[in-house]
Image: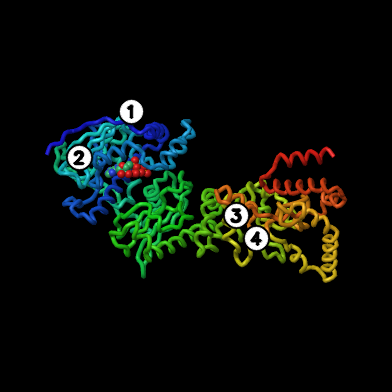
């Protein structure tokens, strides 16, 4: 059958042009990676073929020796990477090699500033893939025939990266893809067979497919060929995870990570496990160093690569990792799942549940080990992924204690905004008689560390964890204790700090203190009652505070209700929330409050009540319902 070529010229999507330009300029110093990317694509294409051939063996046909071939034509100045994988049809060629399908990547590119220096740093954050060919080539031709194509029908794609590409029909004798690179004048080093071999061993040892090159022919003294060149397999060509751990070098693990994750950077650490017994599977799990650009996008893909008996089944099998570990990359190779397993089947399978639960534990253990043995690396990891890990206690009750041990917080003890205090550190430093872990949550670190709620804690030298990530209140609502110690907000309920001291006190001292407290209560009884009445629409109660030393007033939540910080969060997340009434606590030792004792004018008292409430709201980062009214009252009082 002859097919008309039907040649058409198409423009690259704007983002592709941007990407090409940026890539050629920013990856120049690392240009040999184009070979890694192309071999990686070929390996994926062969994986896809194997998978599709499970159902349709005719796709494999007689050409079942799957491999990748790299060939050099010094005269033509071309380097060609060929595979006998799945191939592409015309539509696939146009979509895959002319646009960027991933909406996350597109959005990411839209955010580029156009400033080469700062954008260069960003480019490594997502896989550069096929387009990296243009770092070394002036022109790239792709000839590809899909495994299910009619007869020898193939497609040729051709571009010089000048904003356009052409596609036309052509022929290819068998299924698969050739990527033909016409090397730039100053990139002829990639025509050197020795150099290319070196790069292949460096980047492709972990790939299970053989990467083949032609060797040199044997010549006699006169230069006549006595034995033709033979095929040589350049890489180790066994799936890395099937090899024994002691055989695999650190560099091989690192390269494998780059292959599965499309990350440019090395991984932080990894865990390679062969599980035998009731279930048989291998897992190889990596913690990345750097957050992927789409860590916070809901639709972002995540999960592990799934293999069944060495056959690639799918990417992004998110069923193997809980959402709070969505940054983990790697593979699972199971011997127990059927080869025709589908995403739907993964949803409810006992095998998946056990692999997921064991792998989750492995990851948590890997983090624990990192925290213990390489605290600096762990800190960097925490700074990058801590906010994600904080989703853990709510999502995974079973591992709550393990996750809690991995959490890090800012604290009054360090005086810094860095989150580097573990709950275990806190417990070690607890005061004699202290049985609770205290925290304050606010909108910013500054608001937390200057919060009136922690004044008494500072005075008594009791450590308070300072929480200011939006997720913190949510986290704490699921993390009510650690290592047998209750975790409590200093902005909720009554404080019982006195109990701590009471143990050391004589009965007389206790009685004296109790009497002092009682006297104060009585002295201020009518004031608190009057204020409670005046603020009946805004506060559930006005009472004397035990937490304040410097500020005149603060708001506290009742033992069972949400703190105002939590309410604000829920509202900003679009939740309808009835406004709950907080308790207003006033400081009997503050001059402003003692002066109020003498106030006789009811109207003035009303203004004072509003001022106290207003400043307590502001001090914890809240918003006033009537800010102009507050300013007016304040100015009035100042003038007096
Ligand atoms: N050798 C090949 N055989 C078949 N399809 C291929 C081949 N090379 C590329 N493709 C197709 O083109 C698509 C785009 O490739 P490209 O390398 O740009 O991105 P990717 O591999 O999807 O991801 P990344 O950019 O992270 O590498 C691939 O997803 C694949 O569908």
Q: Earlier in the sequence, mark 1 or mark 3?
A: 1
Q: Is residue 598 visible?
A: yes
Between 204 and 158, which is closer to the camera in this rendering? 158
Residue 39 percent coordinates (x, y): 31, 44
Give yes or no for contact between labels 4 and 1 (Cβ–Cβ under 8 Å).
Answer: no
| Quadrant occupied by the C terminus | top right
Label 1 and label 3: CA atoms lie apart by 52 Å
Between 177 and 569, which is closer to the camera in this rendering? 569
Give yes or no for contact between labels 1 and 3 (Cβ–Cβ under 8 Å).
Answer: no
Label 4 and label 2: CA atoms lie apart by 67 Å
Label 2 and label 3: CA atoms lie apart by 58 Å
The local crowd at label 2, few if under 14, some if 14 to 19, many if 20 or more residues have their Cα within 10 Å, is many
In the image, is 233 to the left or to the right of 546?
A: left
Q: Secondary structure at mark 3?
A: helix
Query: Which of labels 4 and 2 is toward the front?
Result: 4
Label 4 and label 3: CA atoms lie apart by 11 Å
Label 2 and label 1: CA atoms lie apart by 24 Å
Residue 131 percent coordinates (x, y): 34, 37
The local crowd at label 3, few if under 14, some if 14 to 19, many if 20 or more residues have their Cα within 10 Å, is many
Q: Is residue 433 above or below residue 321?
A: below
Q: Residue at x 20, y 55 (%)?
A: 57
Label 4 and label 1: CA atoms lie apart by 62 Å
In the image, is 323 to the left or to the right of 460?
A: left
Q: Secondary structure at mark 2?
A: strand
Q: Earlier in the sequence, mark 4 or mark 2?
A: 2
Residue topped by disc 1: 162
Q: Earlier in the sequence, mark 4 or mark 3?
A: 3
Residue topped by disc 3: 473
Between 490 and 630, which is closer to the camera in this rendering? 630
Give yes or no for contact between labels 2 and 3 (Cβ–Cβ under 8 Å).
Answer: no
Q: Secondary structure at mark 1?
A: loop
Q: Earlier in the sequence, mark 2 or mark 1?
A: 2
């Amino acid at each position: 059958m002859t097919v008309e070529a039907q040649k058409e010229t198409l423009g690259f999507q704007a983002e592709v042009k941007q990407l090409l330009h940026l890539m050629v300029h920013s990856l120049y110093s690392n240009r040999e990676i184009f070979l890694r990317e192309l071999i990686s694509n070929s390996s994926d294409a062969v994986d896809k073929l194997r998978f599709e051939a499970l159902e349709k063996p005719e796709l494999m046909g007689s050409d079942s020796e799957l491999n990748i071939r790299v060939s050099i034509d010094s005269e033509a100045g071309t380097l060609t990477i060929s595979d006998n994988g799945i191939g592409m049809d015309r539509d696939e060629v146009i979509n895959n090699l002319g646009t960027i399908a991933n909406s996350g990547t597109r959005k990411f590119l839209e955010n580029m500033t156009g400033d080469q220096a700062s954008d260069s740093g960003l480019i490594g954050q997502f896989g550069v893939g096929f387009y990296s060919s243009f770092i070394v080539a002036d022109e790239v031709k792709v000839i590809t025939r899909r495994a299910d194509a009619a007869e020898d029908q193939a497609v040729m794609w051709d571009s010089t990266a000048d904003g356009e590409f052409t596609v036309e029909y052509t022929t290819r004798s068998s299924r698969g893809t050739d990527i033909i690179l016409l090397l730039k004048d100053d990139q002829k080093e990639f025509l050197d067979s020795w150099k290319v071999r070196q790069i292949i061993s460096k980047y492709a040892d972990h790939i299970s497919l053989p990467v083949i090159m032609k060797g040199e022919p044997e010549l006699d003294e006169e230069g006549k060929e006595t034995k033709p060149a033979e095929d040589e397999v350049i890489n180790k060509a066994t799936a890395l995870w099937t090899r024994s751990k002691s055989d695999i070098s650190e560099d091989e693990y690192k390269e494998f990570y780059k292959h599965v994750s499309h990350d440019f950077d090395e991984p932080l650490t990894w865990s390679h496990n062969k599980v035998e017994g009731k279930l048989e599977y291998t897992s190889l799990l990596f913690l990345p160093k750097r957050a992927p650009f789409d860590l916070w996008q809901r639709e972002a893909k995540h999960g592990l690569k799934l293999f069944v008996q060495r056959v690639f089944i799918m990417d992004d099998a998110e069923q193997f990792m809980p959402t709070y570990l969505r940054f983990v990359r790697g593979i699972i190779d199971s011997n127990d799942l059927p080869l025709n397993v589908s995403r739907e089947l993964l949803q409810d399978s006992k095998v998946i549940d056990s692999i997921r639960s064991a792998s989750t534990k492995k990851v948590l253990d890997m983090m624990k080990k990192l925290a213990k043995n390489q605290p600096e690396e762990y800190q960097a990891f925490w700074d990058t992924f801590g906010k994600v890990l904080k989703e853990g206690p709510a999502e995974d009750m079973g591992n709550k204690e393990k996750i809690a041990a991995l959490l890090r917080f800012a604290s009054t003890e360090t005086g810094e905004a860095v989150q580097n205090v573990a709950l275990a550190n806190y417990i070690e430093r607890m005061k004699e008689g202290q049985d609770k872990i205290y925290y304050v949550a606010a909108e910013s670190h500054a608001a937390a560390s200057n919060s009136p709620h922690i004044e008494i804690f500072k005075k008594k030298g009791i450590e308070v964890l300072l929480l200011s990530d939006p997720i913190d209140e949510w986290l704490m609502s699921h993390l009510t204790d650690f290592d047998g110690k209750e975790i409590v907000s200093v902005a909720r309920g009554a404080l019982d700090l006195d109990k701590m001291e009471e143990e050391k006190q004589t009965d007389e001292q206790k009685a004296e203190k109790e009497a002092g407290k009682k006297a104060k209560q009585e002295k201020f009884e009518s004031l608190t009652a009057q204020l409670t009445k005046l603020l009946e629409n805004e506060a559930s109660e006005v009472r004397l505070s035990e937490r304040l030393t410097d500020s005149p007033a603060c708001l506290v939540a009742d033992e069972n209700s949400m703190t105002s910080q939590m309410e604000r969060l829920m509202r900003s997340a679009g939740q309808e929330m009835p406004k709950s009434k907080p308790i207003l606590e006033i400081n009997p030792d503050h001059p402003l409050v003692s002066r109020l004792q003498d106030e006789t004018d009811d109207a003035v008292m009303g203004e004072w009540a509003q001022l106290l409430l207003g400043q307590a709201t502001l001090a914890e980062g809240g918003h006033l319902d009537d800010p102009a009214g507050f300013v007016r009252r304040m100015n009035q009082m100042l003038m007096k």
